Amino acid sequence: MSSVKSSASRIRRGSAFALRAFAVALAGFCANPQGARAQQAQLGPVSRLPLPRFVSLKSDRVNLHEGPSKEHPTLWVYERAGLPVEITAEFEIWRKIRDSEGVEGWVLHSLLSGRRTAIVAPKNKEPLLLTEKDHESPVARLSPGVIGMLKRCDGDWCRLQGPGFDGYIKQENLWGAYPGEKVE
């Protein structure tokens, strides 16, 4: 009987400890969500780079496969160099990616570039304002789906550059940079 009792009290003490550890972790996340995301980021087993991470398509023709080999069926063919995608997993020379619409599959790593790009609010219906560095003076209105080079982000605003435009847009209006992420 006493062994059951001591075992039960160990479980309660362990649960209390786990609850305190969870509370401390949650408080740290609330105080510094960017730091918490960075701590949670894993390193890819092949590249040793953070997972997940944003990259872009290097080629105008990229086959998205169901699995990490050419023998797996092709799910989709991307025809837009510069399209931002998120790498979520790695296996040998293959990278599992997700696009802005949530489509996932595997591509050859040689078809990806570390060059950062972003899509203007792909789910939004209205054009968004691109401003000067002062974030007040309008430069252009960008339609949803416009892709540009991500030059830098400070965690709130990003500088986006493309054919005929160069200015700043709220980071929350882009797909291609994590919330609060700083890009140099």
Image: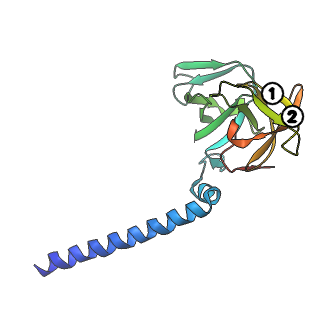
- Where residue 44 appears, as percent x and y from the top left, is 61, 48
| Figure quadrant of residue 117 | top right
Q: Residue reaching furthest front?
A: 136
161 shown above or below 179: above
Q: Residue at x 21, y 75 (%)?
A: 7
Residue 111 visible here: yes
Mark 2 burial class by Cα count in 10 Å: few <14, some 14-19, many 20+ = some
Q: Residue reaching furthest bottom?
A: 2
Residue closest to the eye, 88 or 100: 100
Q: Is residue 96 left or right of residue 112?
A: left
Labels 2 and 1 touching (C-beta < 8 A) = yes
- Where residue 27 appears, as percent x and y from the top left, is 53, 65
Q: Is residue 83 left or right of residue 63?
A: right
Q: Residue at x 52, y 25 (%)?
A: 66
Q: Residue reaching furthest left?
A: 1
Residue closest to the eye, 130 or 103: 130
Q: Residue at x 38, y 73 (%)?
A: 17
Disc 1 designates what residue? Answer: 141
51 shown above or below 9: above
- Where residue 2 appears, as percent x and y from the top left, is 13, 81
Q: Amino acid at mark 1?
A: Arg
172 shown above or below 111: below
Element under disc 1: strand
Give the CA distance from mark 2 to mark 1.
Answer: 8 Å
- Give the position of the N terminus as an image quadrant: bottom left
Disc 2 designates what residue? Answer: 138
Q: Amino acid at mark 2?
A: Pro
